[in-house]
Image: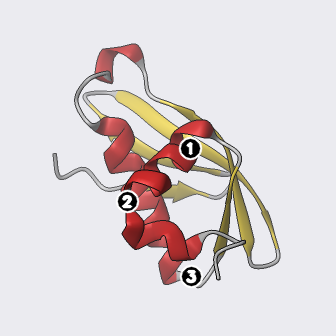
Amino acid sequence: MSNAVNNNTSLHRFELEIDGHIAFAEYTRASDIITFVHTVVPQELGGRGVGSQLARGALDAVRAKGLKVVAQCPFIAGYIAKHAEYQDLLKDAA
């Protein structure tokens, strides 16, 4: 899968389109903090690693902008917990 994750700023979500379906991670932003609130992967894309690809792309974009993350969304929180290279993005990280 080489589809790119895009930041749809008008809808406040990172999107990943595959086979005509859009997986997305919704967020709110305040100053230099981005809060992930909800992630949706359409059933048609389930079991293909789409959620992980979406999380990775969104977190890479957040890092590039120098933002900190609050992971209210259980999926994003779980992804960060399993991938140490992103734990420094958490707002409470030392």
Query: Residue flagged by tag 3: what amino acid is it?
Result: Lys
Residue placed most toward the observer, 92 or 12: 92
x and y percent of residue 51 in the render?
A: 38, 38
Residue under the image location 50 percent in, 44 percent down: 78
Residue placed most toward the observer, 16 or 51: 51
Q: Is residue 25 left or right of residue 44?
A: right
User: Which dot, 3 or 2, sits closer to the camera?
Assistant: 2
Mark 1 neighbour class, 10 Å CA radius: few under 14, some 14 to 19, many 20 or more: many
Residue under the image location 52 percent in, 39 percent down: 75
Which quadrant would the C terminus be assigned to in this image?
bottom right
* Above or below 85: residue 29: above
- Give the CA separation, mark 1 to mark 2: 17 Å
Mark 3 neighbour class, 10 Å CA radius: few under 14, some 14 to 19, many 20 or more: few
Residue extending farthest to the top is 43
The image's mark for residue 84 is none
- Give the CA separation, mark 1 to mark 3: 17 Å
x and y percent of residue 29 in the render?
A: 77, 63
Does residue 55 appear in this view?
yes
Mark 2 neighbour class, 10 Å CA radius: few under 14, some 14 to 19, many 20 or more: few
Sequence-wise, the earlier of marks 3 and 2 is: 3
What residue is pinned by disc 1?
25
The total of numbered circles placed on residues is 3
- Classify mark 1: helix, strand or loop: strand
What residue is pinned by disc 3?
65
Sequence-wise, the earlier of marks 1 and 2 is: 1
Q: Quadrant of residue 84?
A: bottom left
- Classify mark 3: helix, strand or loop: loop
Residue placed most toward the observer, 25 or 73: 73
* Above or below 46: residue 60: below
Sequence-wise, the earlier of marks 1 and 3 is: 1
